[in-house]
Image (cartoon, helix red, strand yellow):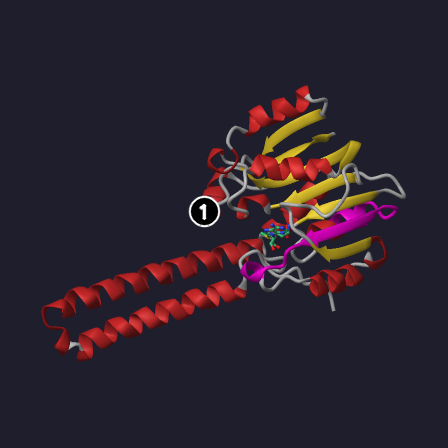
Amino acid sequence: MSANYKNWVPNGMVMGFVAGTAALAFGASAAVLCGKKLGKAQKPIAGLLAAGSAMTALSTLWLKICQDRYSYDGSRQLSRQIIEGTAEYIDVRDGGIALDVGCGSGALTIACAKRNPGAKFIGIDRWGKEYASFSKELCESNAAEEGVADNTEFMQGDAVHLDFEDDTFDAVTSNYVYHNITGTDRKELLRETFRVLKKGGCFAIHDIMSKSKYGDIQAFADELRKEGFESVSVIDTTKGKFMSPAEAALMGLGGSALMIGRK
Ligand SMILES: C[S@@+](CC[C@H](N)C(=O)[O-])C[C@H]1O[C@@H](n2cnc3c(N)ncnc32)[C@H](O)[C@@H]1O
């Protein structure tokens, strides 16, 4: 067996779109073949259902393309590139402890733990129904497969209110989590993550940091610098670091950026 990090586009979502396409196509056919009772409405109803089916089919195709490009088994392996590229910024002294917020299938926690074998890495996630293939058990089995069961731990948790004291961790990291969380200012989510980071601890947070999701992220980086955070930078990862601008557009990942620095 080897680690199975699953996919950021869950199979369940693809299957849901396949089922939707089939149901709409069936409805359109039924409206054409036996919809005489619908009278004048028959054609528009059949047309609407057929158009809906075509759109859902296109969405399914797009999801499949994204799934293939993300896959750890595919030829592109975009997820692996992002995870390993983010983990490169996490250095923790032996005996130190670090946090991965929204760890999913454990990929980033495990990549960091492999790079820092003398430190302990905690991955937290809410493991809700939108990413149903991710779970604590999956993280633990992946950590065992990768030989880092002893320096990793996984637990249920919420990025909005982290269940840790201030200044607990020597490093904090996260990948593609905060943009999923609605109803909270995402800069406040970053603040909550930095709250549990010790003074001098490093951070590497990768997310879709577009203006619509985060507001002015460069102004936020300036705020942090004024407060004494060191070496803060926001790296646009869609200009070749992790992906090209065209790939970012194709995958709906425009605005992806890596915020790094020290508290
Ligand atoms: C796109 S996945 C990324 C998973 C992982 N970080 C990775 O890079 O493979 C987003 C993850 O964020 C988690 N998540 C979303 N909202 C959360 C919250 N409020 N607290 C903790 N985890 C959350 C989801 O459960 C999911 O596992």
Residue 1 falls inside the magenta stretch? no
Name the spot of residue 154 as percent of width and height, x first.
75, 56
Mark 1 residue crowding within 10 angstroms, few (<14) / some (14–19) / many (20+) = few
Residue in the image at 80% along x and 62% along y: 144
- Whether residue 237 can be seen here: no
Q: Toward which corner of the image does residue 49 lie, by quadrant? A: bottom left
Q: On the image, which quarter does residue 21 sit in?
A: bottom left
Amino acid found under the numbered disc labelled 1: Leu
Residue topped by disc 1: 250
At x 86%, y 57%, the residue is: 150
In the drawing, does residue 158 fall left or right of residue 256? right
Give the quarter of the figure containing the N terminus. Answer: bottom right
Name the one closer to the observer, 131 or 78.
131
How far from the left and from the top, in percent, is residue 147? Answer: 82, 59
Q: Is residue 114 magenta?
A: yes
Q: Which residues are magenta?
A: 111-131
Please count the marks in the image.
1
Residue at the extreme bottom of the image, as rendered: 34
Q: Nearer the viewer, residue 61 or 97?
A: 97
Residue at screen point 38% across, 67% down: 20
Tell me if I can see residue 27 in this picture.
yes
The secondary element bearing badge 1 is classed as: helix
Q: Residue at x 62, y 61 (%)?
A: 6
Query: Vertically, is 250 above or below 202?
Result: below
State which quarter of the image contains the C terminus. top right
Left or right relative to 142: residue 46? left
**Which residue appears farthest toward the left when viewing the image?**
40
Residue 16 spot, x, y in % from top left: 45, 67
How far across and how far down the image is residue 75, in percent? 59, 55
